[in-house]
Image: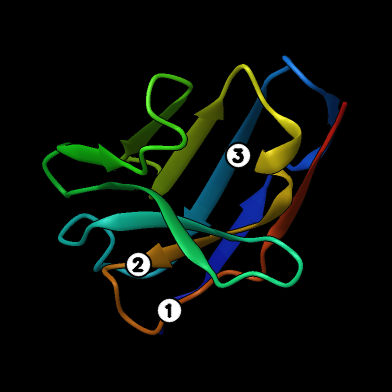
Amino acid sequence: QVHLVESGGGLVQAGGSLRLSCAASGSIFRANAMVWYRQAPGKQRELVAAITGSGSSKYADSVKGRFTISRDNAKNTVYLQMNSLKPEDTAVYYCNLGYLNYWGQGTQVTVSS
């Protein structure tokens, strides 16, 4: 059974930084892509960044150059380093394993202007 736990959210001023972490249980972590999504109030959940098991990454246009996704397979953990945060980055951030139906509980990120 897969269990995902996000951490690292919080309140930050515009221009600030946060690093989100998602720790995964289960042996399938290394073989699968890990994905960060976010959902703002009244909006659909959107893909923010994804990283394959071998480390290839992709990003939503809205976060390119500001966010960096990485993973530590030895720790079964994926990270999202978020720099130059904007108020429009405010959302609940979720990690997902393999584009499958495995989700964490979410962590709130709030960026004040």
Q: Earlier in the sequence, mark 2 or mark 1?
A: 2
Classify residue 92 as left or right of residue 96: right
Question: For the residue carrying disc 3, how many other residues have a C-alpha within 10 Å: few (<14), some (14-19), or many (20+)?
Answer: many
Element marked by disc 3: strand
In the image shown, does 77 or 105 lie closer to the viewer? 105
* Residue 8 visible: no
Determine the secondary structure under disc 2: strand
Residue 64 position in % (x across, y down):
38, 28
63 vs 38: above or below: above
**Location of residue 41 (image quadrant):** bottom right
- Within the image, what quadrant is residue 91 found in? bottom right
Mark 1, residue position: 102
Question: Between residues 5 and 36, which one lies in front from this camera angle?
Answer: 36
Report which residue position mark 3 lands on.
20
Give me the residue at 67% from left, 25% from top.
85
Measuring from the top left, give residue 48's x and y in whole percent: 44, 49
Instruction: Judge by depth and name the residue closer to the eye, 111 or 70.
Output: 111
Mark linked to residue 97: 2
- Give the mark nearest the N terminus, 3 or 2: 3
How far apart are the two marked residues, 3 and 2, measured between alpha carbons? 15 Å
Amino acid residing under circle 3: Leu
